[in-house]
């Protein structure tokens, strides 16, 4: 699954492998790990092509949500958290209701093209 973090300050995707009760990357069979790495690369390429970030951040913390998931975040030297991590950096700014569908459609189209 690919989710969009509802914080317009950062183009931010969350990848969630559809495997129940998996908490760590080492819990995946080798073939699934390889697929996951390629999916992270694909999400990174999508964010790079759409937003031309200065840096891409990829992280898997899982301290609050234990289900294995990866954050893929486009970062900019001008973003409010730069150069630190996005976690705990101010209050999120939600996409406006009329803005969420266009951004998700744009991201979905970019995934289909990669």
Image (cartoon, grey):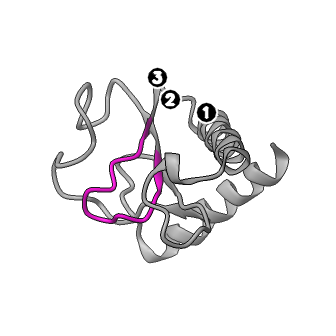
Q: Nearer the viewer, residue 46 or 65?
A: 65
**At 39% across and 55% down in the image, what residue appears?**
8
Q: Which residue is mark 3?
A: 54
Indicate the secondary structure of the residue bearing disc 3.
loop
Indicate the secondary structure of the residue bearing disc 1.
helix
Q: Is residue 35 magenta?
A: no
The boundaries of the magenta stretch are: 58-71
Indicate the secondary structure of the residue bearing disc 2.
loop
Judged by its main secondary structure, the magenta piece is loop
Residue 41 drawn at (x, y percent): 65, 36
Discs 3, 2 touching: Cβ within 8 Å: yes
Discs 1, 2 touching: Cβ within 8 Å: yes
First in sequence, mark 1 or 2: give its number: 1
**At 32% across and 28% down in the image, what residue appears?**
78
Q: Nearer the viewer, residue 35 or 83?
A: 35
Q: CA distance from mark 3 to mark 2?
A: 4 Å
**At 64% across and 45% down in the image, what residue appears?**
33
Q: Which residue is mark 2?
A: 53
Residue 103: assigned label: none
- Judged from this view, the residue extending furthest toward the right is 113
**At 54% across and 73% down in the image, what residue appears?**
20
Residue 72 drawn at (x, y percent): 49, 44
Looking at the image, is 47 positioned above or below residue 24?
A: above
Q: How many marks are shown on the rendered structure?
A: 3
């Amino acid at each position: 699954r690919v989710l969009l973090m509802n914080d317009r300050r950062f183009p931010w995707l969350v990848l969630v492998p559809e495997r129940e009760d998996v908490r760590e990357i080492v819990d995946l069979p080798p073939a699934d790990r390889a697929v996951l790495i390629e999916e992270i690369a694909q999400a990174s390429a999508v964010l790079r092509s759409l937003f031309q970030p200065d840096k891409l951040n990829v992280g898997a913390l899982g301290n609050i949500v234990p289900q294995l998931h990866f954050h893929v975040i486009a970062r900019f030297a001008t973003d409010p958290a730069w150069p630190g991590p996005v976690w705990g950096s101010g209050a999120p700014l939600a996409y406006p209701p009329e803005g969420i569908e266009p951004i998700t459609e744009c991201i979905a189209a970019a995934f289909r093209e990669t």
